[in-house]
Amino acid sequence: MGSEPSDAEVINEVLQGRPERFQILLERYQPYIFSILAKHLPPQNIEEIAHETFVQIYLSLPKFKGESPEEWKGWISKIALRAAYSFWREQYRRREVQLDALTQEQREWVKEVMGRASKDRFDELTRQEEAAQVLEWAMGKLSPKDRMVLELTALEGYSVKEAADMLGWSTANVKVRSMRAKRKLNRILKEIMEA
């Protein structure tokens, strides 16, 4: 009786009418879901979207057909990524266009980075807080689909196939969207340089 039940055992119990057992999965995977969402969301929104993610996991339990812990983690990570995508889609719908949202220092930083040929210098500058702010601002100008595909492929290093699987899209769609999103992001950064 001292051993912990497996994920599969808990899922089976929940599906057989013991919804209170879902608490075990929530406690077990809350840090994992938070770590996924922290890569894709502003800090102040992580808790709310994590809650929505766990509600969706609970509601979708009858659809889970896997057995292994790896399949379970992959399945719940897809739900978390889709929740993050939904968050950005909603933000995109409600956005207000702010023409001068970047400070003069941030604009100067973009000009400097875009004008330099040295990758080492660029890597050094990207670690700075201003780089993160500029990137976040520029990513905010992209559609939710463009943002998610760039975050997964360009920033997190997932392959096109992995990103397609996580998002539930075709690999062709991810390739095309990734290429277009990179062009859009480049255009946004060039506009800053010309301002």
Image (tube, rainbow, N blue to C red):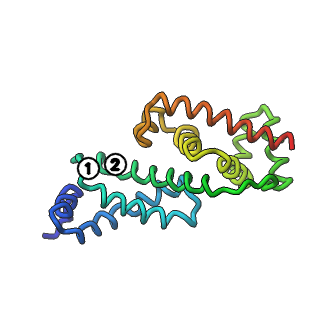
Badge 1 amino acid: Phe
- Labels 2 & 1 near each other (Cβ < 8 A): yes
Q: Residues within 10 Å of mark 1 (few under 14, many from 20)?
A: few
Q: Earlier in the sequence, mark 2 or mark 1?
A: 1
Callout 1 secondary element = loop
Residue pointed to by mark 1: 64
Q: Position of residue 39 (x, y in %)?
A: 53, 53
Q: Amino acid at mark 2?
A: Trp
Q: Residue at x 56, y 44 (%)?
A: 151
- Measured from the top left, where is residue 139 in percent x and y? 65, 47
Residue in the picture at 40% in, 38% down:
165
Asked whether, in this view, residue 67 is left or right of residue 163, the answer is left
- Residue 156: in sight, yes or no? no
Question: Would residue 44 appear left or right of 15 to someone viewing this image?
Answer: right
Location of residue 171 by image quarter: top left
Q: Which residue is mark 2?
A: 75
Residue 2 vs 132, above or below: the answer is: below
| Quarter of the N terminus within the rendering | bottom left
Residue placed at 62% from the left, 32% from the top? 180
